[in-house]
Image (cartoon, rainbow, N blue to C red):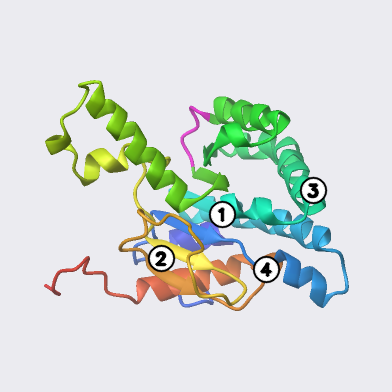
């Protein structure tokens, strides 16, 4: 139905106007899998599996309506503090997700990228992510960034270290380092900053996600747990985005 909406042959019931600008880059903190499971008397693992199915629906909708980049927070550098059993399940679930969904995403021209410390992940998952990125590298559709073993502070530190080495090796002068040069040293190099960041499950914080890139991002928080987040909820977030006036520190013209 969203393709019909985009062409104007069907109106969105969520208040989104196809005549308004759809955000180029949407980032999502997929929060609430555990709470969703607890509310139903289920193990947290069931929530994570339900969340994986939700992700696939949102990827399809984002692709349908013309979003160019979708970045999702799947596993943070702080999530290693969770129980070993849950961490192991999450690693296996990500691997299963790639095995089961990669062919469909590839057929839909989705380009998969990984954000974070790849070397810190289990070797089997490293191989699967590397294979997925290689297989979809030349696809021309939606770019999906999977933030796994990702932390905003760690990303900034790695960029600082890389630029310090470049200065030390004479590859760049310190005076030449500006925002563009710094951004090129981040995991998101070559991509636009997020226009809209959505966090589900009611918490109102960034949780160390895309700290540099979200300087002027519009934030949208909703109380829905991630497994219950639907394409309609995504459209509501976009409708809210379209009503906002983005000045990037300047004045309205």
Give coordinates of residue 165: x percent, y percent: 31, 28
Q: How far apart in space, not on screen, are marks 2 and 1 (Cα)? A: 27 Å
Q: Which residues are magenta?
A: 137-141
Q: Nearer the viewer, mark 3 or mark 2?
A: 3
Give coordinates of residue 191: x percent, y percent: 37, 43
Residue annotated with mark 3: 89
Q: Secondary structure at mark 1?
A: strand
Point out the tag, 2 or 4, that comes first from the N-terminus: 2
In the foreground, 9 or 136: 136
Q: How far apart in space, not on screen, are marks 3 and 1 (Cα)? A: 17 Å
Give the class, few, some or many, for how many residues have Cα within 10 Å of label 4's Cα (few <14, many ≥20). Answer: many
Q: How far apart in space, not on screen, are marks 4 and 3 (Cα)? A: 16 Å
Given contact means CB atoms under 8 Å apart, are the residues at marks 4 and 3 in contact?
no
Residue annotated with mark 4: 32
Point out the tag, 3 or 2, that comes first from the N-terminus: 2
Give coordinates of residue 89: x percent, y percent: 79, 48
| Residue 84 lies in the magenta stretch | no
Badge number at residue 73: 1
Q: Is residue 250 above or below residue 186?
A: below
Q: Quadrant of the N terminus?
A: bottom right
């Amino acid at each position: 139905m969203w393709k019909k909406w985009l062409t104007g042959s069907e109106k969105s019931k969520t208040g989104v106007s196809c005549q308004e600008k759809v955000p180029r880059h949407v980032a999502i903190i997929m929060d609430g899998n555990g709470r969703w499971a607890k509310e139903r008397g289920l193990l947290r693992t069931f929530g994570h599996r339900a969340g994986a199915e939700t992700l696939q629906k949102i990827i399809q909708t984002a692709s349908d309506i013309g979003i160019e980049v979708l970045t999702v927070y799947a596993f943070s550098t702080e999530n290693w503090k969770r129980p070993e059993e849950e961490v192991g399940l999450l690693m296996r679930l990500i691997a299963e997700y790639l095995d089961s969904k990669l062919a469909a995403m590839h057929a839909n021209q989705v380009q998969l990228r990984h954000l974070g410390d790849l070397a810190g992940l289990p070797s089997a998952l490293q191989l699967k992510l590397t294979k997925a990125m290689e297989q979809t590298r030349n696809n021309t559709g939606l770019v999906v960034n999977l933030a796994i073993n990702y932390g905003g502070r760690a990303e900034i530190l790695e960029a600082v270290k890389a630029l310090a080495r470049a200065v030390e090796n004479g590859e760049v002068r310190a005076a030449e380092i500006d925002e563009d040069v710094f951004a090129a040293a981040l995991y998101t190099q070559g991509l636009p900053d997020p226009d809209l960041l959505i966090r589900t499950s009611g918490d109102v914080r960034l949780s160390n996600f895309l700290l540099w890139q979200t300087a002027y991002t519009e934030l949208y928080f909703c109380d829905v747990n991630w497994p219950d987040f639907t394409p309609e909820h995504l459209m509501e977030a976009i409708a809210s985005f379209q009503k906002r006036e983005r000045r990037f520190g300047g004045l309205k013209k």
